[in-house]
Amino acid sequence: MKYMTINNRKVAFEDEKNVLSVIRKSGIDLPTFCYHSELSTYGACRMCVVEDDRGRVFASCSETPREGMVIYTNTPRLQHHRKMILELLLASHCRDCTTCRKNGVCTLQKLAQQLGVSYVRFENNKPQLPLDESSDCIVRDPNKCILCGDCVRTCDEIQGLGVLDFAFRGARMQVMPAFNKDLAKTDCVGCGQCRAVCPTGAITIKQNIRPVWEAVADPDTRVVVQIAPAVRVAVGDKFGIPKGENSLGKLAAALRRMGFDEIYDTNFGADLTVMEESEELLERLDSGENLPLFTSCCPGWVKFCENKYPDLREHISTCRSPQQMFGAVLKEEARMDKEDKRKTVVVSIMPCTAKKAEIHRPEHRTDGEQDVDYVLTTTEVTRMIKEAGIDLAQMPSEALDMPFGLSSGAGAIFGVTGGVTEAVLRRLAGSSRQEELENISFTGVRGIDGIKEASVRLGEREVKIAVVNGLKCADEVMSRIRSGETYYDFVEVMACKRGCITGGGQPVPIGARTKKARLEALYKIDTVAQIKRSNENPIIQTLYSGLLRGKEHKLLHNEK
């Protein structure tokens, strides 16, 4: 144990990687724009500067703690320094705060209020730059960028894509794609992780709120909504509900009061995916063709594979994602209902920005009709609930609508990395005995490591599995597969670290405790679920013998 002095108090430290970590551990919330514990240290914003006993001022994020160090975090000199930084940032910043998507959760706004910056003395002489709204997933507004570099490092270090970078020098510096291309013309996969770390409104979610409200208000439209597993453990964040608490029942109640006609669970779509993907895996194992089988649930990952590894595209499962399978089933049910003359609009509530692009893919249409009409992220539905004057925390817990409100625990864990693999293994294991399910969960598919490997015995076969989260890790695995260095039978990939619980459409900020709470909450939902395996869901069984009979491939698979 070592000691340093912070504001005349002796503070112990051990293996903290920088002085900032020691300061925060001591209970002082030192402000930063550019520091994230999972990213490299950048040290650009200079908000975390401290002063030592010799009068030296330095950035605490890039200084290693030393025994006997004496520092101060809030001297008059430092206060003046931080206020000046904020004033200069605000001077060149678009200050339409009341209409900004980040109003209330903007770090620049928060720190200006916290440090008492209420007046900007400097004139804004920066030219107005055009918005980039080309992507279906996110909107980039360079007029609100503070050059913290969070998006640049996340895209490069976590996702391995490097779509965004700095361009020009000095006062002309900007963050942009190469050659200032539209995002839609780059290798951006729409994962939204840049949006998740952006401290201002420079990168925000592409909104679908207005057309959804219009559909809800139309008496000739039947609006059906499906809710993804990761949404229920995050939607309560902005309503004072404890982090990670399952708010599905409250969300269902709120959506009914907002005017949605039918509320279902995407976990049901996940059960369908398990049924189809497990069968596809068995077929490929028997034939030996196109192995390994890659999962197709994550649209960010699918786009990444198509962009960078087009030669391996045939390995992607032909199964549609749970969202698309469920959308196709709901639209088919509506087509068969001759009595209800209303138009059916399917809305998905997702933790993911990439899902907004997925619904527009040409293969996700049935008989010329789009299977899912709109995608709302968790953040958007939170805003809609507030627009409707509803306090989610005060809502009663209501059941979802039947018949598609019943799902298995296997469907719930689709929201975390390794969940798809575990659900498929349960389906193929052939038993619901508790000890066998526990054995599957301990095979190595659970956990937050970027790459997890496991071998599972299925009958006479030894099946080699990889579970990957984060596209940089996916790139590493794909390179090894392409070169023949590594062999797998089944590979699950999720574009976002830890899975959908940290998707680009989730409420921010997402700290370590929030991530842990969301992950544990989904596993808890699975633990208490009466149905553990997708094939034991009675509604799934009824669907296969009824509406899906003879239409399984048409509604649940993409033609390759």
Image (cartoon, rainbow, N blue to C red):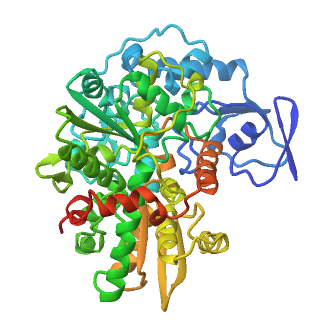
| Nearer the observer, 248 or 177 | 248
Residue 227 at x, y percent in the picture:
42, 42
| Nearer the observer, 376 or 273 | 273
Q: Residue furthest bottom?
A: 460
Q: In the rendered image of this protein, does residue 266 appear above or below residue 126?
A: below
Residue 210 at x, y percent in the picture:
28, 24
Q: Residue at position x 50%, y 88% from top? A: 459
Q: In the rendered image of this protein, does residue 116 appear above or below residue 45?
A: above
Residue 255 is at least partly visible in this image? yes
Query: Would you say 202 lies left or right of 442 here?
Result: left
Residue 211 at x, y percent in the picture:
25, 27
Query: Would you say 330 lies left or right of 352 here?
Result: left
| Figure quadrant of residue 77 | top right
Q: Residue at position x 54%, y 81% from top? A: 456
| Figure quadrant of residue 59 | top right
Q: In the rendered image of this protein, does residue 487 appear above or below residue 381?
A: below
Q: Residue furthest left?
A: 368
Residue 46 is at least partly visible in this image? no
| Nearer the observer, 139 or 283 | 283
Query: Would you say 49 lies left or right of 238 here?
Result: right
Q: How many marks?
A: 0
Query: Would you say 513 lies left or right of 210 here?
Result: right
Residue 490 at x, y percent in the picture:
42, 76
The quarter in which the C terminus is drawn is bottom left
Q: Residue furthest front?
A: 339
Q: Residue at position x 32%, y 81% from top? A: 283
